[in-house]
Amino acid sequence: MKEQLENIKRSAISEIETSGTVKVLDDIRVRYLGKKGELTSVLKSMKNLSKEERPIIGQVANEVREMLEVSIKDRKLSLEKVEQNQRISAETIDITLPAKKVVVGKKHPLDKTLEELCDIFIGMGYEIVSGREVENGYYNFDALNLGKEHPARDEQDTFYINADTMLRTATSPVQVHTMENQSLPIRMVAPGKVYRSDEVDATHSPIFHQIEGLVIDKNITFGDLKGVLAEFAKKFFGDKVEVKFRPHYFPFTEPSAEVDVTCVMCGGVGCSVCKGEGFIEILGCGMVHPKVLEMSGIDSKKYQGFAFGMGIERLTMLKYNINDLRLFYDNDVRFLEQF
Ligand code: DAH
């Protein structure tokens, strides 16, 4: 039996020393020291030994068991280290690899223009006012001095909801609400969507955006209007731009003008964009008509004012050399990511 124990010791030690993983080592432990293990069954069979032999063999058996336990413990520690090192090196992050590209969205060109316009006017002391997109005939037409016979009242231009309710055709009605509701003086801009029943083409859309401006105070002159809009044009298009005020007609202003700037494409020499003129129209403006002031309860003898309105799509097309307004609404990222 002693020999049997020696054999078990030898083969177990050699197996322990050559074991390659903690799992294999654990199997060895079970095979030798487990309940049904080889060493355990030898210990169990000791009851068959004589009284004299029992303590001697018992001592040897205990020594073998202790020895196996110690060497299993040692081997386990070193195998665990090896496995830990393998895990660490397998999990190492290669920080030299290129990172995953994060695609960040961009501001829509119309929003960029809108924010830029608001910044420019806020910088000049204007307040941003929002209006309503559904109006009635009084605000959309009458209060702006557009008589019943005015062509803009024709159904072709206006989306009617019913006989006296329509989608606003310009941001100008915000002027009227502001004059009615705010105390004087007024210095505001009102950006927003406007609606006209136009066919879609390169320069028209049934929904587009405008920004309206209104200043009402004492001693306001056409000179103030010119100063503000010339300053705006330089801030938006750049210092080199020249501004031209061309007489025009609008029912709600008197006198009225359209403002042209030197063509952003050719710098004023003349090209296909400005049709050889060297100038391009960017907005409408004028001194608020006394009738418009009076209709909103403002004494036109004491107060004067000027107003202006411009298309945000048009300004954006001119600034970035965009030749088709439909591009703004197509949502093609190849177009949008350029801004
Ligand atoms: N409402 C005009 C349009 O839609 C733009 C405009 C012109 C607004 C002159 C004004 C103005 O306030 O004074 O074409």
Image (tube, rainbow, N blue to C red):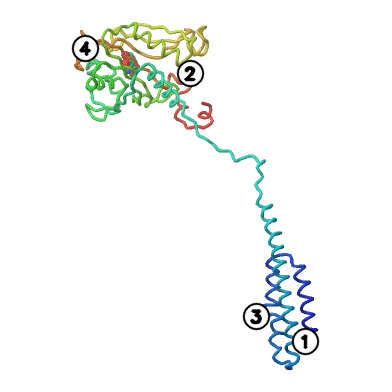
Q: Quadrant of residue 326?
A: top left
- Disc 3 versus disc 4: distance between alpha carbons? 109 Å
- Disc 3 versus disc 1: distance between alpha carbons? 19 Å
The residue lying toward the viewer, choosing from 306 and 159, is: 306
Between marks 4 and 1 in the image, the one whose residue lies nearer the viewer: 1
Q: Residue at x 30, y 6 (%)?
A: 221
- Disc 4 versus disc 1: distance between alpha carbons? 126 Å
Earlier-in-chain disc, 2 versus 1: 1
- Disc 2 versus disc 3: distance between alpha carbons? 87 Å
Q: Amino acid at mark 2?
A: Lys
Q: Amino acid at mark 4?
A: Lys
Between marks 3 and 4 in the image, the one whose residue lies nearer the viewer: 3
In this image, 73 relative to 4: left or right?
left
The residue lying toward the viewer, choosing from 261 and 169, is: 261
From the top left corner, tell me how far across and down residue 26 is, in percent. Answer: 68, 70
Badge 4: few (under 14), some or many (20 or more) residues near its Cα, within 10 Å?
A: some
Identify the residue under disc 1.
1
Q: Amino acid at mark 3?
A: Lys
Identify the residue under disc 2.
319
Residue 254 versus residue 179 in the image, above or below: above
Identify the residue under disc 4.
291
From the top left corner, tell me how far across and down residue 52 is, in percent. Answer: 75, 92
Q: Which quadrant of the figure shows ligand 1?
A: top left
Q: Amino acid at mark 1?
A: Met
Badge 3: few (under 14), some or many (20 or more) residues near its Cα, within 10 Å?
A: few
Q: Residue at x 67, y 75 (%)?
A: 30
Identify the residue under disc 3.
35
Question: Mark 4 vs ligand 1: CB under 8 Å?
Answer: no
